Image (cartoon, grey):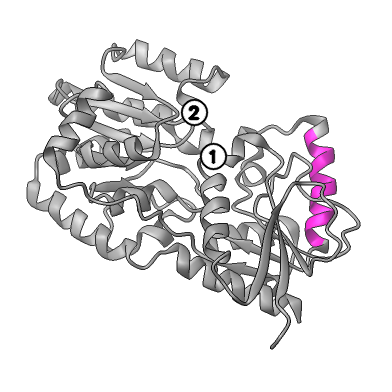
Amino acid sequence: MDKKIKIAFVNPPVVGHLIRGTGVYTSALYNELEKSEEIDINKVQFGSDLSGFDIAHYPYFDPFFLTLKTSQPVKTLVTVHDLIPLKYPSHFPAGIRGSLKWFWQKHLLQKTAGILTDSSASKEEIINITGISQDKIKVIYLGVNEEFKKIKDKNLLEKARKNMNLPDHFLLTVGDVNWNKNIPNLIRTFSLVNKKDNQLQLLLVGKGFVSESLELREIMKLIESFGLSDKVIRRSDLSLLDLVNVYNLADLFILTSFAEGFGLPLLEAYSCQCPALTTKAGSLQEIAGKSAIYIEPHDISNMAEIVKEILSNKEKKQEMITYGLKRVSEFSWKKCARETLEFYKQVST
């Protein structure tokens, strides 16, 4: 019997990334890899002694924090979800300390045995910014947790709506307040849509929508300037079940990003049979595919007209739902784990 490859799966050192986003990737991928009989995989804390392992996999990378270790006694793999802050430096100022840390992080990244990333768009970013050979970088798409699905019990959904104090009709976005998420233009779009349908509300889900920050202050000023304070709902720390309910209850999911490394909420919406709009920015066209309906993130009137058209067209919404279900069937954590396992084998030889 061949010897099993021993993998150290290193927990991200940045606490905020143990939950949504990279946290979902870390836990879902590990749970699938743990089922494999071809490897012996163990979660370890950042900075742990890695002696005795064959490969150390760091499932998270931040250019401005020290998320890799030096002088590793094993081959090192790292998942770089995106390098958006480096591609758009004017919107993500690193400062002197951040720049110095990036200089060191880049050096460590170049020394790794291999890099995993979520999309071809992110792979191109990594090549252009770091100069690392494309042969060293493997694109592996993410999956969607099985909990994200259509809930057919209307009574359960109405109970969830009441418990979360949600309106009968609302647009939904799930994410953060970073520049690339384009939330100000989403607010401007909603202001135009709301003029036609003042019963419609907007639900913003994510920690950034309730945690104090300069970005949130600017968003709140914009909401107030349009007189939408009673029309915009902000929620954070939803349970997984509540998040699934929210996708099921929403009239339309909308992701207005200027850039994304993957765009996992888009697939979550597809899985819950919530019609979803997105842009062609970054990886989003790659993930959403050829049949999706796209919006132009800089064109407020374009976005508003498309949203209004979809909300008033049941047949169009059903077409979007049907397409979304077909598209999301191409993504799974099992597939992600299988391809990751193959990369482990490739690197270990």
Q: Judge depth for marks 2 and 1 and give the one in front.
A: 1
Q: Of the residues shown, which amino acid type is indicated by label 1?
A: Ile
Under circle 1, the secondary element is loop
Question: Badge 2 local density, few (<14 within 10 Å), some, or many (20+)?
Answer: some
Under circle 2, the secondary element is helix
> Is 20 in the magenta?
no
From what the image shows, is residue 235 above or below residue 257? above
Q: Residue furthest bottom?
A: 1
Q: Of the residues shown, which amino acid type is indicated by label 2?
A: Lys
Residue 165 seen in the current view? yes
Which quadrant: the C terminus? bottom right
The overriding secondary structure of the stretch rendered in magenta is helix
Residue named by callout 1 = 19
257 displayed left or right of 341: left
In magenta, the rendered stretch is 98-110
Q: Residue 207 carries which label?
A: 2
Q: Would you identify the image quadrant in which residue 254 lies? A: top left
Looking at the image, do the residues carrying marks 2 and 1 touch, with CB atoms under 8 Å apart? yes
Q: Could you say where residue 273 lies in the image, as x and y percent from the top left?
A: 23, 51
The residue at 55%/73% (across/down) is: 339
148 displayed left or right of 132: left
> Is 107 in the magenta?
yes
Q: Which residue lies furthest to the front in this view?
A: 1
Question: Badge 1 local density, few (<14 within 10 Å), some, or many (20+)?
Answer: few
Q: Could you say where residue 233 lies in the image, as x and y percent from the top left?
A: 32, 21
The residue at 52%/20% (across/down) is: 211
Q: Which label's residue is closer to the chain start, 2 or 1?
A: 1
